[in-house]
Image (tube, helix red, strand yellow):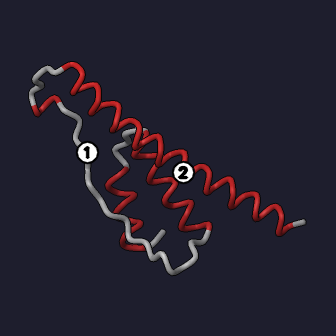
Amino acid sequence: MRALDELEYEKEMKNTFISLLLSIQNKRRQFANERKRKGTKIDPSQLPQYMTASIPYNDHQHMDNATLSSLIKILRAINDDSSAVPTLLTDYILTGT
């Protein structure tokens, strides 16, 4: 029974990860489409600033729940436009959690 609970928890975490990733992608896409549709010139200082970051990931290694949880925390902060994003990314890259 315990293994079933762990699998259910892992499945829930993976679904959360995918949902957050899709939400972030949709926000960026909507903003770009809105800008194109309006066709107005916007002062670059008024545009949202997007940070480009590459999160280290080894696709030949199974991702444990702790790592997935860390990535979810980062994605949630990005989705909420939190000021904690740089700190979370730095901690993840330096410590892996």
Where residue 29 sits, quadrant-wise, is top left
* Residue 52 locus on image (x, y percent): 26, 54
Write down the quadrant of residue 64 in the picture: bottom right
Mark number, residue 18: 2
Q: Position of residue 8 (x, y in %)?
A: 76, 58
Give left or right: position of 55 versus 14. left
Position of residue 18 relative to residue 1, above or below, is above
- Residue type at mark 1: give it: Tyr
Q: Are marks 1 and 2 in contact (CB under 8 Å)?
A: no
Identify the residue at image location x=26%, y=50%. 51
Q: Quadrant of residue 69?
A: bottom right
Residue 25 or 43: which is nearer the viewer?
25
- Residue 24's spot in the image, x, y percent? 41, 42
Q: Is residue 84 left or right of residue 46?
A: right
Say which mark, if any, is on residue 1.
none
Residue 65 horizontal/vertical position (percent): 62, 66
- Residue at coordinates 53% horizontally, 67% vertically from top-left? 67
- N-terminal label among 1 and 2: 2
- Which label was assigned to residue 50? 1
* Residue at 48% from the left image edge and 59% from the top image edge: 71
Disc 2 crowd, CA 10 A, few/some/many (<14, 14-19, 20+): few
Residue 14 is left or right of residue 7, and the answer is left
Residue at position x 47%, y 48% in the image: 21
50 vs 60: above or below: above
